[in-house]
Amino acid sequence: MIPLKGTRTEVPCWRVLKPPNCEIVPITPQAKLYLGMPAIISSPGMQQLIELVERIAQTNAAVLITGESGSGKELIARAVHHYSLRCAKPWVDVSCAALPEHLVESELFGYERGAFSGADSPKPGLFELANHGTLFLDEVGELEPRMQVKLLRVLDGVAYFRLGGTRKVTVDVRIVAATNQDLEHMVETGQFRSDLYHRLGQICLRVPPLRERAEDIVPLAEHFLKQSNLDRHFSADALQALQRHRWPGNVRELRNVVTKAAVLARDSEIGAGDLLLAPLRVPAESAPVTTVPSANLDGMEKNTILRVLAQTNGHQQRAAELLGISRRTLSRKLKLYGREAVRESCAS
């Protein structure tokens, strides 16, 4: 059985796929399947990105995929493996944010029997499971510094030990990583190693947000609608509303909106009112540009986080979801602010 990644509370947070072949299976005129994940690509920007993926996939270069949360970074990672010479070999993906810090090393590098309490039998790590294939490290910016050092050594071809092991393990793995964080800024602030950043980003790909590829909105919406209810269709005003929306949550938000409308709409035709879209906001680019010192930005970030935490009555998981960051990132920020600041925000 393959454990599928859904919410971050699912265990395990990784999966191994061994595709039987490298065929592209069309499911609509605009869709392809990459390791079982449908790709609906109509916009010129995404078509150019896939063309670039086809070229770089033939190499063994590490690939770093950046983009906003929900924009489709995993889809592009799967496409890299799909078009690569390793496409018939294992695909292993893991969410670095979903793994508890004390389990990251044992999951990535494995362990031997007796390495720690509960280690009743040896277990290969994800690097071994991905040998000769591709290992996808999602949310790689969440790795803590000690693991960044060990990961760098393995990426440089250095053999490693399983936890509690005495025999070195050597693997041949192509690394594809993804993040919605600004790793360059994290390097500047000392949160991410510069050498690891450059090692992961031999090839850098940016997935544009949905608002920058409007041609994908309607095909994606119709695809999600067919998945939810074949008997429903969008009205003209609903399609216009979908195209006008800014989609801050990107493809993930679009899927949720369409799925909800397919369930709650009273008629077979889904109107604009059935979509329950948030009111339109003035685009950021139309607002006057103001230079803000970095110290002020840090203060604004702190105030925003503490305000959202207060709104959720101190519920950190809900606050992290509202902020669009991982639970571990929020926890790390709160440690920097100190307990007093957190208590005051929750009490206000």
Image (tube, helix red, strand yellow):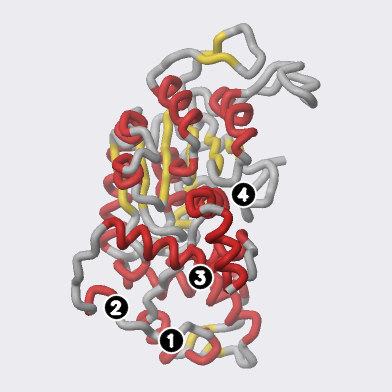
Q: Are marks 2 and 4 in contact (CB under 8 Å)?
A: no
Mark 3 or 4, closer to the camera: 3
Residue at 47% in and 24% down: 150
Side (left or right) of 283 relative to 175: left
**Quadrant location of residue 250?**
bottom left
Residue 266's x, y, as percent?
64, 92
Q: Circle 1 is placed at which residue position? A: 279
Label 1: element kind:
loop
Mark 2 to mark 3 CA distance (whole Å): 23 Å
Q: Which amino acid does label 1 sit on?
A: Pro
Q: How crowded is mark 2: few (under 14 residues within 10 Å), some or many (20 or more)?
A: few
Mark 2 or 3, closer to the camera: 3
Mark 1 to mark 3 CA distance (whole Å): 22 Å
Tell me which label, 4 or 1, sits earlier in the chain: 4
Mark 1 or 3, closer to the camera: 3
Residue situated in front as seen by the camera: 308 or 130: 308
Label 4: element kind:
loop
Q: Which amino acid does label 4 sit on?
A: Lys
Q: Circle 3 is placed at which residue position? A: 307
Q: Residues within 10 Å of mark 1 (few under 14, many from 20)?
A: few
Q: Circle 4 is placed at which residue position? A: 5
Residue 210 showing in the rendered view: yes
Residue 20's x, y, as percent?
56, 36
Tell me which label, 1 or 3, sits earlier in the chain: 1
Q: Do the residues labelled 4 and 1 touch (CB within 8 Å)?
A: no
Q: Circle 2 is placed at which residue position? A: 283
Residue 21's x, y, as percent?
51, 37
Residue 27's x, y, as percent?
50, 60
Label 3: element kind:
helix
Quarter of the figure with the C terminus:
bottom right
Residue situated in front as seen by the camera: 206 or 133: 206
